[in-house]
Image: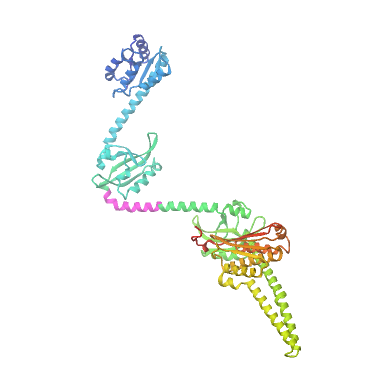
């Protein structure tokens, strides 16, 4: 039973009488002393629940008395309220620093005095009740047959004596240690997982596990363990109750190990299934491709947003439709696909989808049989290939156009060069046929015919070099270009320089042919139109990128105007399209009286590129 008791320490009797009468009127027990020294002598015997201490007293003032009271173990936790006529901040701060919990200014206000005294008495009594409650709990904790443990992050922060007796360790060997360190290695993972899910089992009737622990002497015991989350020092902790079940556990140990392994396997597979489902949902919803899931008879049950956007429906609308409504039926490929899917075959194919506005959308589709909510469904991923098909169409038209230009040029060379020469040769031979054998005229016509045949052979060789240089097939692009430049320089019409220190033969033969023809066409344009004195050709390679830079110092031209011309722009357009066919690009730059520069870039697939010391 706790009583309301107050010790008044004051050297002025009038102050004591006033304070005592106010407290006695509220049935508060009052004891008094007239000095700080006297208070120190009697306080341990009376042990009041509150001390009212005058600040200004002879011999020993309230500050010193308070400090000494706080040094006495039995008295240190008794709250002290200062009685003072001083209310300046420095005095108040000094009072609190000495150990006071409150202060009351003189003269007393009865209501204020009672309010403050009752408040601190109530706190004091509650603290005493808590201490008594803790003492009783401690008695219960240490007398129970169960080991009681409190864990924070698996570290032991509280335990009773039963745990020490059960495990054979002393207090220092247990305090602040990781609980799983006292568990056998094969059971530690099980315990760790169990503790991490303690909050999920709070309030459940059956929440125990059985584990094998290590004693101080390296022997083992089996314990039955219950754990649940509790509040502790303002945080969340885990309360663990342990019971020694070694005697009954030995007979069940083998069964327990089997069950534990099975439970672990089920949990892992469940987690794996959840992850797989989440991955599927993420891929399905975030895929840029159109993805549709339908039953084997074609009924659409799910579609992602990409499918809805491509076809012009909402996802909800698609889920009310059949695949027959979105597939162009003049192509019967999907009938074959549907029958094959019944057999479980994974297929890739091309069909045309029909959009909500009636447009036909060519798509490349990959369909596979999937288990969707327990039944077989077809999941199809479709990609719009309209741009790719248009690009292939443009590329094919460019190839045909380029080849047609090449054929026309070769035909013109044959007609104007070899055709004319052979016609003249035929004429000379007809004259020889009519002339008298061995005559001067006959001999002269034969010589003229032989000279024309030599000229035709030379023209034929030049045309063959333009089609596929002999050097290119046997020695590669660099040698072919070098020999071509050497022949040009031997004619003396224009000075040509060629550099190729960076190129390391990464292009295939058909790609080198295209590049050689590009250079040939650039030189022909320069010789025909530019009136240039110098040409510079530079061939380089940076990792998987090939660069050709061609410049001349000719009279230049308006690039846009030439490209927009129906006839004169064909040559430049061929150069640009030829570079695009090789996954590259061409940039043509020129101004009047400033020459011309062509920069041609080729991007070679990375699997053909191997880094060497030149790239470092």
**Residue 474 placement, left or right of 197:** right
| Image side of residue 478 versus residue 232, left or right | right
Count the numbered circles shown.
0
Residue at 73% in and 85% down = 444
Coordinates of residue 97 in the picture (x, y in percent) = 37, 22
Q: Is residue 252 magenta?
A: yes
Residue sitting farthest toward the bottom: 437
The part of the image, by quadrant, that contains residue 84 is top left
Answer with the quarter of the image where residue 73 lies: top left
Is residue 591 shown left or right of residue 87? right
Which span of residues is magenta-colored? 249-267
Identify the residue shown where x is 67% and y is 60%.
553
Q: Quadrant of residue 473?
A: bottom right
Residue 107 placed where, x, y %? 41, 11
Q: Residue furthest top?
A: 14
Q: Is residue 293 above or below residue 42?
A: below
Q: Can see residue 319?
A: no
**Magenta region includes residue 118:** no
Q: Nearer the viewer, residue 200 or 361?
A: 361
* Coloring applied to the structure: rainbow
Q: Give the overall secondary structure of the magenta segment.
A: helix
The residue closer to the viewer here, 289 or 115, is 289
Which quadrant is the N terminus positioned in? top left
Q: Position of residue 500 (x, y in %)?
A: 57, 63
Whether residue 106 appears in this view of the structure is: yes
| Residue 399 coordinates in the image, percent (x, y) | 65, 66
């Amino acid at each position: 039973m706790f009583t309301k008791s107050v010790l008044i320490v004051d050297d002025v009797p009038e102050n004591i009488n006033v304070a005592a009468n106010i407290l006695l009127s509220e049935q508060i027990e009052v004891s008094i002393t007239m000095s700080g020294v006297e208070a120190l002598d009697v306080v341990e015997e009376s042990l009041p629940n509150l001390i009212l201490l005058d600040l200004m007293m002879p011999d020993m003032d309230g500050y010193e008395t308070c400090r000494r009271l706080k040094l006495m173990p039995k008295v240190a936790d008794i709250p002290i309220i200062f009685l003072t006529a001083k209310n300046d901040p420095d005095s108040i701060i000094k009072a609190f620093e000495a150990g006071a919990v409150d202060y009351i200014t003189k003269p007393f206000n009865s209501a204020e005095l009672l309010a403050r005294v009752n408040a601190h008495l109530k706190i004091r009594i509650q603290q005493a009740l808590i201490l008594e409650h803790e003492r009783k709990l401690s008695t219960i904790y240490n007398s129970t047959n169960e080991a009681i443990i409190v864990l924070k992050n698996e570290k032991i922060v509280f335990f009773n004596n039963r745990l020490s007796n059960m495990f054979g360790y002393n207090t220092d060997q247990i305090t602040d240690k990781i609980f799983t360190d006292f568990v056998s290695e094969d059971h530690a993972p099980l315990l760790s997982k169990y503790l991490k899910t303690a909050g999920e089992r709070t309030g459940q009737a059956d929440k125990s596990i059985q584990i094998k622990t290590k004693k101080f002497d390296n022997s083992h015991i089996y314990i039955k363990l219950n754990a649940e989350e509790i509040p502790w020092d303002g945080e969340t902790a885990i309360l663990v109750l342990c019971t020694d079940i070694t005697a009954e556990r030995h007979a069940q140990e083998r069964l327990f190990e089997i069950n534990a392994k099975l439970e672990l396997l089920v949990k892992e597979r469940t987690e794996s299934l959840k992850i797989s489902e989440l991955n599927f949902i993420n891929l399905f919803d975030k895929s840029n491709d159109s993805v549709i899931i339908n039953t084997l008879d074609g009924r659409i049950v799910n579609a992602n947003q990409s499918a809805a956007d491509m076809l012009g429906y909402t996802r909800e609308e698609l889920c009310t439709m059949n695949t027959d409504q979105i597939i162009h039926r003049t192509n019967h490929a999907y009938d074959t696909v549907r029958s094959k899917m019944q057999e479980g075959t994974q297929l890739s194919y091309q069909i045309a989808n029909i959009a909500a506005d009636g447009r036909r959308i060519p798509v490349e589709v990959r369909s596979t049989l999937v288990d969707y909510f327990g039944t077989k469904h077809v999941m199809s991923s479709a990609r719009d290939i309209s741009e790719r098909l248009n690009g292939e169409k443009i590329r094919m038209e460019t190839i045909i156009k380029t080849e047609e230009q090449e054929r026309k040029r070769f035909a013109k060379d044959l007609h104007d060069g070899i055709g004319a020469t052979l016609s003249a040769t035929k004429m000379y031979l007809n004259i020889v046929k009519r002339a008298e054998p061995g005559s001067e005229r006959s001999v002269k016509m034969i010589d003229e015919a032989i000279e024309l045949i030599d000229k035709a052979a030379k023209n034929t060789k030049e045309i063959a070099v333009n089609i596929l240089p002999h050097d290119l097939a046997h020695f590669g692009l660099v040698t072919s270009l070098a020999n071509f430049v050497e022949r040009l320089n031997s004619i003396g019409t224009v000075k040509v320089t060629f550099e190729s220190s960076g190129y390391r033969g990464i292009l295939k033969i058909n790609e080198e042919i295209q590049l050689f023809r590009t250079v040939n066409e650039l030189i022909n344009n320069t010789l025909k139109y530019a009136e240039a004195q110098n040409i510079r050709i530079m061939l380089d390679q940076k990792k998987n990128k090939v660069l050709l830079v061609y410049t001349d110092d000719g009279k230049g031209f308006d690039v846009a105007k030439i490209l927009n011309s129906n006839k004169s722009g064909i040559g430049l357009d061929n150069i640009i399209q030829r570079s695009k066919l090789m996954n590259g690009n061409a940039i043509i730059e020129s101004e009047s009286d400033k020459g011309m520069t062509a920069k041609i870039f080729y991007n070679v697939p990375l699997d053909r590129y191997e880094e060497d010391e030149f790239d470092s």
